[in-house]
Image (cartoon, helix red, strand yellow):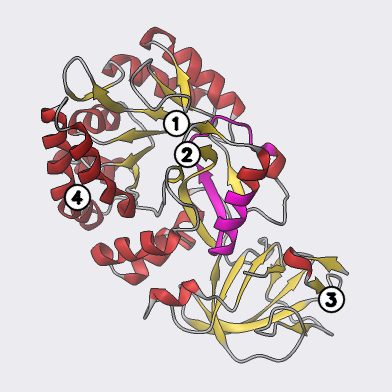
Amino acid sequence: MTESLFGARWPQAAPLHLRGVILPSRVEADLWVVEGKITFVPQLDAVELDDTRTTPSVHASRWILSGLVDAHCHIGLGAGGGVTRSEAEAQALTDLRSGVTLVRDAGVPIDTAWLEGSSQAPKIIRSGRHIARPRRYLKDFGVEIEPDCLVEEVRRQASASQGWVKLVGDWIDRDGGDLAPLWPADIAAQAIRAAHEEGARVTAHCFGEESVSQLVRAGIDCIEHGCGLDSETVRIMAGEGIALVPTLDNWRIFPGIADQAQDRFPTYAAHMRALYATRAEAIGAAIAAGVQVYAGTDAGGTRSHGTILPELQALAELGGTDFALGAASWRARTWLGRPGLEEGAPADLLILDSDPSRDLNSLASPAAILLDGVPVVS
Protein backbone atom coordinates (compact mmCIF):
# COMPACT_ATOMS: atom_id res chain seq x y z
CA MET A 1 0.00 0.00 0.00
CA THR A 2 1.17 3.53 -0.82
CA GLU A 3 0.23 6.55 1.25
CA SER A 4 -0.77 9.65 -0.73
CA LEU A 5 -1.40 13.13 0.61
CA PHE A 6 -3.30 13.47 3.89
CA GLY A 7 -3.01 9.78 4.66
CA ALA A 8 -5.34 8.29 2.03
CA ARG A 9 -4.08 4.80 1.19
CA TRP A 10 -4.22 3.16 -2.23
CA PRO A 11 -3.28 -0.28 -3.56
CA GLN A 12 -0.40 0.99 -5.67
CA ALA A 13 0.29 -2.46 -7.11
CA ALA A 14 -3.23 -2.67 -8.56
CA PRO A 15 -3.91 -0.87 -11.85
CA LEU A 16 -6.31 2.07 -11.66
CA HIS A 17 -9.09 2.35 -14.25
CA LEU A 18 -10.46 5.67 -15.52
CA ARG A 19 -13.12 6.38 -18.09
CA GLY A 20 -14.01 9.81 -19.37
CA VAL A 21 -14.01 12.32 -22.17
CA ILE A 22 -10.35 12.91 -23.01
CA LEU A 23 -9.34 16.51 -23.67
CA PRO A 24 -8.55 17.99 -26.11
CA SER A 25 -9.76 15.19 -28.42
CA ARG A 26 -13.22 15.09 -26.75
CA VAL A 27 -13.35 11.33 -27.35
CA GLU A 28 -14.75 9.22 -24.53
CA ALA A 29 -12.30 6.46 -23.72
CA ASP A 30 -10.85 4.17 -21.07
CA LEU A 31 -7.38 4.46 -19.70
CA TRP A 32 -5.47 2.72 -16.97
CA VAL A 33 -2.68 3.70 -14.60
CA VAL A 34 0.02 1.11 -14.01
CA GLU A 35 2.94 1.91 -11.70
CA GLY A 36 2.27 5.61 -12.08
CA LYS A 37 2.15 5.57 -15.91
CA ILE A 38 -0.72 5.94 -18.37
CA THR A 39 -1.67 3.04 -20.59
CA PHE A 40 -4.54 2.44 -22.98
CA VAL A 41 -4.04 -1.33 -22.78
CA PRO A 42 -6.85 -2.92 -20.73
CA GLN A 43 -5.72 -4.21 -17.32
CA LEU A 44 -7.25 -7.09 -15.40
CA ASP A 45 -8.19 -6.58 -11.75
CA ALA A 46 -8.08 -2.77 -12.04
CA VAL A 47 -9.74 -0.72 -9.34
CA GLU A 48 -12.01 2.23 -10.09
CA LEU A 49 -11.50 5.79 -8.92
CA ASP A 50 -14.39 6.78 -6.68
CA ASP A 51 -15.21 10.44 -6.25
CA THR A 52 -14.39 10.20 -2.57
CA ARG A 53 -10.78 9.58 -3.73
CA THR A 54 -10.21 7.27 -0.77
CA THR A 55 -12.02 4.01 -1.62
CA PRO A 56 -12.27 2.02 -4.86
CA SER A 57 -15.70 2.02 -6.51
CA VAL A 58 -17.27 2.26 -9.97
CA HIS A 59 -17.75 5.86 -11.12
CA ALA A 60 -19.54 7.62 -13.96
CA SER A 61 -17.86 9.10 -17.00
CA ARG A 62 -15.92 12.30 -16.44
CA TRP A 63 -13.62 14.71 -18.28
CA ILE A 64 -9.91 13.91 -18.16
CA LEU A 65 -6.99 16.14 -19.11
CA SER A 66 -3.31 16.41 -18.32
CA GLY A 67 -2.59 18.16 -15.04
CA LEU A 68 -2.37 21.93 -15.26
CA VAL A 69 0.85 23.80 -15.97
CA ASP A 70 1.80 27.08 -14.29
CA ALA A 71 4.42 28.44 -16.67
CA HIS A 72 5.41 31.40 -14.50
CA CYS A 73 5.62 30.48 -10.82
CA HIS A 74 8.05 31.19 -7.99
CA ILE A 75 7.97 28.34 -5.47
CA GLY A 76 10.56 29.38 -2.91
CA LEU A 77 10.10 33.16 -3.22
CA GLY A 78 8.44 35.42 -0.67
CA ALA A 79 7.96 39.16 -0.32
CA GLY A 80 11.44 39.54 1.16
CA GLY A 81 13.29 37.10 -1.10
CA GLY A 82 13.97 33.43 -0.43
CA VAL A 83 11.74 31.54 2.00
CA THR A 84 12.33 28.61 4.35
CA ARG A 85 11.93 25.03 3.21
CA SER A 86 8.66 24.67 5.10
CA GLU A 87 7.29 27.81 3.46
CA ALA A 88 8.32 26.59 0.01
CA GLU A 89 6.69 23.23 0.68
CA ALA A 90 3.47 24.99 1.69
CA GLN A 91 3.55 27.04 -1.53
CA ALA A 92 4.09 23.90 -3.58
CA LEU A 93 1.24 22.05 -1.90
CA THR A 94 -1.11 24.97 -2.49
CA ASP A 95 -0.26 24.91 -6.20
CA LEU A 96 -0.70 21.13 -6.37
CA ARG A 97 -4.11 21.32 -4.71
CA SER A 98 -5.20 23.80 -7.40
CA GLY A 99 -4.63 21.13 -10.07
CA VAL A 100 -1.15 22.28 -11.11
CA THR A 101 1.11 19.26 -11.54
CA LEU A 102 3.89 21.00 -13.49
CA VAL A 103 5.55 24.36 -12.82
CA ARG A 104 8.08 26.28 -14.85
CA ASP A 105 10.01 28.17 -12.19
CA ALA A 106 10.48 31.81 -13.21
CA GLY A 107 13.34 32.62 -10.86
CA VAL A 108 13.86 32.02 -7.13
CA PRO A 109 16.74 32.86 -4.76
CA ILE A 110 16.89 29.34 -3.28
CA ASP A 111 17.58 25.91 -4.75
CA THR A 112 14.34 23.90 -4.66
CA ALA A 113 15.90 20.66 -5.90
CA TRP A 114 14.86 18.87 -2.69
CA LEU A 115 11.23 19.07 -3.89
CA GLU A 116 11.96 16.75 -6.83
CA GLY A 117 10.02 13.53 -6.45
CA SER A 118 7.86 14.90 -3.64
CA SER A 119 4.25 13.67 -3.53
CA GLN A 120 3.31 17.06 -2.10
CA ALA A 121 4.64 19.29 -4.87
CA PRO A 122 4.16 19.79 -8.58
CA LYS A 123 7.05 18.79 -10.79
CA ILE A 124 9.27 21.85 -11.22
CA ILE A 125 11.40 22.92 -14.18
CA ARG A 126 13.94 25.11 -12.39
CA SER A 127 15.54 28.21 -13.93
CA GLY A 128 17.89 29.44 -11.22
CA ARG A 129 17.86 33.07 -10.07
CA HIS A 130 16.67 36.22 -11.78
CA ILE A 131 19.54 38.13 -13.36
CA ALA A 132 19.26 41.88 -12.78
CA ARG A 133 21.36 45.00 -12.27
CA PRO A 134 22.07 46.70 -8.95
CA ARG A 135 19.13 48.88 -7.84
CA ARG A 136 17.20 47.87 -10.95
CA TYR A 137 14.94 45.18 -9.52
CA LEU A 138 13.41 43.95 -6.27
CA LYS A 139 15.98 43.65 -3.48
CA ASP A 140 17.19 40.12 -2.62
CA PHE A 141 15.28 38.48 -5.48
CA GLY A 142 18.02 38.02 -8.04
CA VAL A 143 21.71 38.02 -8.84
CA GLU A 144 22.73 41.66 -9.38
CA ILE A 145 25.50 42.29 -11.92
CA GLU A 146 26.64 44.89 -14.41
CA PRO A 147 26.25 44.33 -18.16
CA ASP A 148 29.86 43.29 -18.73
CA CYS A 149 29.22 40.25 -16.51
CA LEU A 150 25.95 39.22 -18.14
CA VAL A 151 27.26 36.56 -20.52
CA GLU A 152 29.26 34.83 -17.79
CA GLU A 153 26.32 34.93 -15.37
CA VAL A 154 23.94 33.54 -17.96
CA ARG A 155 26.27 30.60 -18.50
CA ARG A 156 26.45 30.06 -14.74
CA GLN A 157 22.67 30.12 -14.28
CA ALA A 158 22.16 27.88 -17.33
CA SER A 159 24.42 25.23 -15.84
CA ALA A 160 22.51 25.36 -12.55
CA SER A 161 19.04 25.24 -14.11
CA GLN A 162 16.88 22.70 -15.88
CA GLY A 163 16.93 24.41 -19.24
CA TRP A 164 15.83 27.99 -18.57
CA VAL A 165 17.50 31.30 -17.67
CA LYS A 166 15.51 34.30 -16.41
CA LEU A 167 16.55 37.87 -17.21
CA VAL A 168 15.00 41.03 -15.86
CA GLY A 169 14.52 42.86 -19.13
CA ASP A 170 13.37 46.21 -17.80
CA TRP A 171 12.59 48.04 -14.57
CA ILE A 172 12.28 51.61 -13.48
CA ASP A 173 15.42 53.68 -14.08
CA ARG A 174 15.27 56.12 -11.18
CA ASP A 175 17.59 58.58 -12.89
CA GLY A 176 15.45 58.64 -16.02
CA GLY A 177 12.17 58.38 -14.13
CA ASP A 178 10.65 55.69 -16.33
CA LEU A 179 10.88 52.07 -17.45
CA ALA A 180 14.10 51.34 -19.32
CA PRO A 181 15.93 48.21 -20.52
CA LEU A 182 18.54 46.81 -18.14
CA TRP A 183 20.91 45.48 -20.82
CA PRO A 184 22.46 46.96 -23.96
CA ALA A 185 20.92 45.17 -26.94
CA ASP A 186 24.21 43.76 -28.22
CA ILE A 187 25.18 42.31 -24.84
CA ALA A 188 21.72 40.80 -24.39
CA ALA A 189 22.09 39.11 -27.78
CA GLN A 190 25.48 37.68 -26.78
CA ALA A 191 24.00 36.38 -23.52
CA ILE A 192 21.10 34.69 -25.29
CA ARG A 193 23.50 32.99 -27.68
CA ALA A 194 25.60 31.84 -24.72
CA ALA A 195 22.54 30.30 -23.05
CA HIS A 196 21.69 28.47 -26.26
CA GLU A 197 25.23 27.13 -26.42
CA GLU A 198 24.70 25.77 -22.91
CA GLY A 199 21.46 24.08 -23.99
CA ALA A 200 19.17 26.50 -22.16
CA ARG A 201 16.35 28.77 -23.24
CA VAL A 202 16.02 32.37 -22.09
CA THR A 203 13.01 34.27 -20.87
CA ALA A 204 12.72 37.83 -19.59
CA HIS A 205 10.51 40.03 -17.47
CA CYS A 206 9.41 42.85 -19.78
CA PHE A 207 6.85 45.56 -19.05
CA GLY A 208 7.76 48.33 -21.49
CA GLU A 209 7.91 48.61 -25.26
CA GLU A 210 11.66 49.03 -25.68
CA SER A 211 12.89 46.00 -23.77
CA VAL A 212 10.52 43.51 -25.36
CA SER A 213 11.34 44.81 -28.83
CA GLN A 214 15.11 44.56 -28.24
CA LEU A 215 15.02 41.10 -26.68
CA VAL A 216 12.74 39.61 -29.32
CA ARG A 217 15.11 40.87 -32.01
CA ALA A 218 18.01 39.44 -29.99
CA GLY A 219 16.57 35.93 -30.33
CA ILE A 220 15.06 35.37 -26.89
CA ASP A 221 12.84 32.30 -26.43
CA CYS A 222 10.05 33.69 -24.27
CA ILE A 223 8.68 36.96 -22.89
CA GLU A 224 7.05 37.29 -19.49
CA HIS A 225 4.22 39.84 -19.12
CA GLY A 226 4.76 41.55 -22.49
CA CYS A 227 2.62 44.58 -21.75
CA GLY A 228 4.45 46.72 -24.29
CA LEU A 229 4.03 44.49 -27.35
CA ASP A 230 3.61 46.32 -30.64
CA SER A 231 2.48 44.92 -33.99
CA GLU A 232 5.99 44.43 -35.40
CA THR A 233 7.21 42.65 -32.26
CA VAL A 234 4.15 40.42 -32.34
CA ARG A 235 4.85 39.60 -35.99
CA ILE A 236 8.41 38.53 -35.18
CA MET A 237 7.33 36.47 -32.17
CA ALA A 238 4.73 34.61 -34.21
CA GLY A 239 7.19 33.97 -37.04
CA GLU A 240 10.07 32.87 -34.83
CA GLY A 241 8.06 30.81 -32.34
CA ILE A 242 8.88 33.09 -29.40
CA ALA A 243 6.48 32.34 -26.57
CA LEU A 244 4.55 34.72 -24.33
CA VAL A 245 3.45 34.15 -20.73
CA PRO A 246 1.39 37.28 -19.98
CA THR A 247 0.40 36.64 -16.32
CA LEU A 248 -2.79 38.57 -17.09
CA ASP A 249 -4.49 38.31 -13.72
CA ASN A 250 -1.47 39.92 -12.06
CA TRP A 251 -1.72 43.05 -14.21
CA ARG A 252 -4.42 44.37 -11.89
CA ILE A 253 -1.64 45.56 -9.58
CA PHE A 254 -0.48 48.11 -12.18
CA PRO A 255 -2.81 50.96 -11.09
CA GLY A 256 -1.62 50.55 -7.50
CA ILE A 257 2.03 50.61 -8.62
CA ALA A 258 1.30 53.80 -10.55
CA ASP A 259 -0.40 55.42 -7.57
CA GLN A 260 2.58 54.66 -5.32
CA ALA A 261 5.01 56.13 -7.85
CA GLN A 262 2.99 59.20 -8.81
CA ASP A 263 4.75 61.79 -6.64
CA ARG A 264 8.36 60.76 -7.30
CA PHE A 265 8.09 59.30 -10.81
CA PRO A 266 5.06 60.74 -12.61
CA THR A 267 6.29 59.69 -16.06
CA TYR A 268 6.68 56.11 -14.91
CA ALA A 269 3.26 56.21 -13.24
CA ALA A 270 1.62 57.44 -16.44
CA HIS A 271 3.45 54.76 -18.44
CA MET A 272 2.23 51.96 -16.15
CA ARG A 273 -1.34 53.22 -16.40
CA ALA A 274 -1.09 53.32 -20.19
CA LEU A 275 0.24 49.76 -20.32
CA TYR A 276 -2.60 48.63 -18.10
CA ALA A 277 -5.19 50.37 -20.27
CA THR A 278 -4.00 48.62 -23.45
CA ARG A 279 -3.34 45.17 -21.93
CA ALA A 280 -6.26 43.39 -23.58
CA GLU A 281 -5.48 44.90 -26.97
CA ALA A 282 -1.79 43.91 -26.77
CA ILE A 283 -2.31 40.31 -25.67
CA GLY A 284 -5.36 39.85 -27.85
CA ALA A 285 -3.32 40.88 -30.89
CA ALA A 286 -0.62 38.36 -29.95
CA ILE A 287 -3.17 35.56 -29.68
CA ALA A 288 -4.78 36.54 -32.98
CA ALA A 289 -1.38 36.56 -34.70
CA GLY A 290 -0.60 33.03 -33.55
CA VAL A 291 1.97 33.78 -30.86
CA GLN A 292 2.42 30.82 -28.52
CA VAL A 293 0.71 32.03 -25.34
CA TYR A 294 0.83 30.06 -22.10
CA ALA A 295 -0.69 30.44 -18.64
CA GLY A 296 1.36 31.68 -15.70
CA THR A 297 0.28 33.11 -12.36
CA ASP A 298 3.45 34.91 -11.20
CA ALA A 299 2.79 33.29 -7.80
CA GLY A 300 5.46 34.05 -5.21
CA GLY A 301 6.79 37.31 -3.88
CA THR A 302 3.60 39.08 -2.84
CA ARG A 303 1.38 37.04 -5.18
CA SER A 304 -0.64 34.15 -3.73
CA HIS A 305 -0.12 30.58 -4.88
CA GLY A 306 -2.92 28.40 -6.17
CA THR A 307 -4.30 31.08 -8.52
CA ILE A 308 -4.25 29.25 -11.85
CA LEU A 309 -8.05 29.44 -12.26
CA PRO A 310 -8.32 33.26 -12.37
CA GLU A 311 -5.41 33.31 -14.81
CA LEU A 312 -7.25 30.90 -17.10
CA GLN A 313 -10.42 32.95 -16.81
CA ALA A 314 -8.50 36.05 -17.86
CA LEU A 315 -6.99 34.20 -20.83
CA ALA A 316 -10.41 32.84 -21.80
CA GLU A 317 -11.77 36.38 -22.07
CA LEU A 318 -9.30 36.97 -24.90
CA GLY A 319 -8.97 33.57 -26.57
CA GLY A 320 -11.86 31.40 -25.39
CA THR A 321 -11.99 28.52 -22.93
CA ASP A 322 -10.41 25.87 -25.19
CA PHE A 323 -7.49 28.23 -25.85
CA ALA A 324 -7.06 28.90 -22.13
CA LEU A 325 -7.18 25.20 -21.23
CA GLY A 326 -4.57 24.34 -23.84
CA ALA A 327 -2.39 27.19 -22.60
CA ALA A 328 -2.31 25.53 -19.18
CA SER A 329 -2.34 21.87 -20.15
CA TRP A 330 -1.61 20.05 -23.41
CA ARG A 331 -0.03 22.90 -25.41
CA ALA A 332 2.06 24.02 -22.44
CA ARG A 333 3.39 20.51 -21.92
CA THR A 334 4.43 20.20 -25.54
CA TRP A 335 6.23 23.56 -25.34
CA LEU A 336 8.09 22.52 -22.20
CA GLY A 337 9.01 19.12 -23.60
CA ARG A 338 6.92 17.16 -21.12
CA PRO A 339 4.51 14.38 -22.15
CA GLY A 340 0.79 14.81 -21.89
CA LEU A 341 -2.01 12.29 -21.94
CA GLU A 342 -0.30 9.55 -23.93
CA GLU A 343 0.88 5.98 -23.64
CA GLY A 344 3.67 5.60 -21.08
CA ALA A 345 3.47 9.19 -19.79
CA PRO A 346 3.41 9.89 -16.06
CA ALA A 347 -0.19 9.80 -14.85
CA ASP A 348 -0.34 13.47 -13.87
CA LEU A 349 -4.02 14.01 -14.52
CA LEU A 350 -6.95 16.23 -13.69
CA ILE A 351 -10.32 14.48 -13.53
CA LEU A 352 -13.45 16.63 -13.59
CA ASP A 353 -17.16 16.03 -13.10
CA SER A 354 -18.16 18.54 -15.79
CA ASP A 355 -16.78 19.90 -19.05
CA PRO A 356 -14.21 22.66 -18.32
CA SER A 357 -14.50 23.99 -21.86
CA ARG A 358 -18.08 24.93 -21.04
CA ASP A 359 -17.33 26.28 -17.58
CA LEU A 360 -13.80 26.82 -16.29
CA ASN A 361 -15.16 26.91 -12.74
CA SER A 362 -15.24 23.10 -12.87
CA LEU A 363 -11.48 23.32 -12.31
CA ALA A 364 -12.12 24.66 -8.80
CA SER A 365 -13.50 21.33 -7.55
CA PRO A 366 -11.92 18.44 -9.45
CA ALA A 367 -13.12 14.90 -8.85
CA ALA A 368 -9.46 13.96 -8.51
CA ILE A 369 -5.92 15.15 -9.11
CA LEU A 370 -3.39 12.43 -9.86
CA LEU A 371 0.35 12.88 -9.49
CA ASP A 372 2.26 9.88 -10.84
CA GLY A 373 -0.99 7.96 -10.57
CA VAL A 374 -1.51 8.67 -6.88
CA PRO A 375 -4.65 10.65 -6.01
CA VAL A 376 -4.11 13.94 -4.23
CA VAL A 377 -6.77 14.90 -1.73
CA SER A 378 -7.56 18.61 -2.05
The alpha-carbon separation of the residues under discs 4 and 3 comes to: 50 Å
Identify the magenta region.
90-113
Closest to the observer: 62 or 248? 248
The alpha-carbon separation of the residues under discs 1 and 3 comes to: 42 Å
Q: Of the residues shown, which amino acid type is indicated by label 2?
A: Ala
Sequence-first tag of 2 and 3: 3
Q: Of the residues shown, which amino acid type is indicated by label 4?
A: Arg
Sequence-first tag of 1 and 2: 2
Q: Of the residues shown, which amino acid type is indicated by label 3?
A: Ala
Depth check, mark 4 against mark 3: the one in front is 4
- Numbered circle sitting on residue 166: 1
The alpha-carbon separation of the residues under discs 4 and 2 comes to: 21 Å
Closest to the observer: 348 or 279? 279
Sequence-first tag of 4 and 2: 2
Depth check, mark 2 against mark 3: the one in front is 2
The alpha-carbon separation of the residues under discs 2 and 3 comes to: 37 Å
